[in-house]
Image: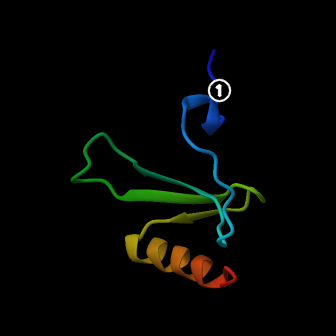
């Protein structure tokens, strides 16, 4: 049986008290030749499904840093 619950895998279950948010980050290349095609990225906020697209790694990092600064604590 497949499960995603941590305690079913023998891992201790913890309740986090820290501020956190969950994002899905996808990075891909538009071409089969990675040295010749631009890389792309998207960031999806898991809770709201809000999605942002990036073509520049620095912009991606800046966006994630801004999100991190919004967290309480």
State which quadrant residue 11 falls in: top right
SS for dot 1: loop
Please indicate whether residue 60 sits to the left or right of residue 9 in the image: left
Q: Residue at x 56, y 30 (%)?
A: 9
Q: Residue at x 65, y 85 (%)?
A: 73
Q: Residue at x 54, y 76 (%)?
A: 63
What residue occupies the far right of the structure in this picture? Answer: 48
Percent across and percent down for residue 71 are 67, 79
Please indicate whether residue 36 sits to the left or right of residue 23 in the image: left
Q: Quadrant of the N terminus?
A: top right
Q: What colour scheme governs how the chains and residues are painted in the rendered image of this protein? A: rainbow
Against 53, residue 59 (above or below) is: below
Nearest the viewer among 1 and 24 is 1
Q: Residues within 10 Å of mark 1 (few under 14, many from 20)?
A: few
Q: Residue at x 61, y 38 (%)?
A: 6
Percent across and percent down for residue 44 are 64, 57
Against 56, residue 45 (above or below) is: above
Please indicate whether residue 61 sits to the left or right of residue 21 in the image: left
- Which residue does the numbered mark 1 point to in the structure image? 3
């Amino acid at each position: 049986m497949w499960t995603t619950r941590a305690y079913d895998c023998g891992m201790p279950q913890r309740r986090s008290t820290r501020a956190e948010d969950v994002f899905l980050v996808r990075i891909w290349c538009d071409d089969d030749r990675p040295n010749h095609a631009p890389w792309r990225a998207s960031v999806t906020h898991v809770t709201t499904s809000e999605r942002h697209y990036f073509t520049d790694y620095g912009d991606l990092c800046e966006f994630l840093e801004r999100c991190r600064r919004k967290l309480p604590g």
